[in-house]
């Protein structure tokens, strides 16, 4: 069974950057299809951030387009999320999911990593 673990969250000022990492285990990385990142802010529902296909093609939510970049690293079994020009509205717990259909998560979740952007 595939397992995922997010890391790299923290506290950053507005305009700053962070890189999140989702480490995948329990399954050959190359057999994963489309994976993705989601986030959940306090009091809100979990929302789509980005999906990345097995070939590395990314689809981003409008709210993060141009600021976030997702990358698959098959040699490291990771899915990274580079986040630039962070805004207070990016504050959330960020989760990765092992299988994303369109913008719907259908696979396993990690435990999440907290990102806090101060104004």
Image (cartoon, rainbow, N blue to C red):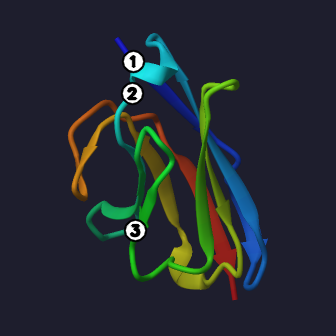
Judged left or right of residue 119, residue 88 is left
Mark before the other along the chain sequence, 2 or 1: 1
Which callout, 1 or 3, points to the residue nearer the camera?
A: 1
SS type, badge 2: loop
Q: Give me the residue at 75% from left, 84% from top.
A: 15
Question: Quick one: label 3, few (<14), some, or many (20+) residues within 10 Å?
Answer: few
Residues at discs 2 and 1 in contact (Cβ within 8 Å): yes
Mark before the other along the chain sequence, 3 or 2: 2
Per the model, the C-alpha gap separating discs 1 and 3 is: 27 Å
18 lies above or below 3: below
Q: Mark 1 points at which residue?
A: 2
Q: How many labels does the image show?
A: 3
11 lies above or below 98: below
Q: Quadrant of the N terminus?
A: top left
The picture places residue 59, in percent across and down from the top left corner, at: 40, 64
Q: Residue 32 carries which label?
A: 2
SS type, badge 1: loop
Q: Mark 3 points at which residue?
A: 42
The quarter of the picture where residue 23 lies is: top right
The quarter of the picture where residue 87 lies is: bottom right
Q: Residue 43 carries which label?
A: none
Per the model, the C-alpha gap separating discs 2 and 1 is: 9 Å
Which callout, 2 or 1, points to the residue nearer the camera?
A: 2
Question: Quick one: label 2, few (<14), some, or many (20+) residues within 10 Å?
Answer: some
Q: Give me the residue at 49% from left, 54% from top.
A: 94
SS type, badge 3: loop
Judged left or right of residue 29, residue 69 is right
The picture places residue 98, in percent across and down from the top left corner, at: 37, 34
């Amino acid at each position: 069974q595939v397992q995922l673990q997010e890391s790299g969250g923290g506290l950053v000022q507005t305009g700053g950057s962070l890189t999140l990492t989702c480490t995948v285990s329990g399954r050959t990385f190359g057999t994963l299809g489309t994976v993705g990142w989601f986030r959940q802010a306090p009091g809100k529902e979990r929302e789509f951030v980005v999906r990345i296909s097995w070939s590395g093609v990314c689809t981003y939510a409008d709210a993060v387009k141009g600021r976030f970049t997702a990358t698959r690293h098959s040699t490291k079994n990771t899915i990274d999320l580079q986040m630039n020009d962070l805004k207070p509205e990016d504050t959330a717990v960020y989760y990765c999911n092992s299988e994303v259909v369109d913008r719907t998560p259908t696979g396993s979740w990690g435990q999440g990593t907290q990102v806090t952007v101060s104004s």
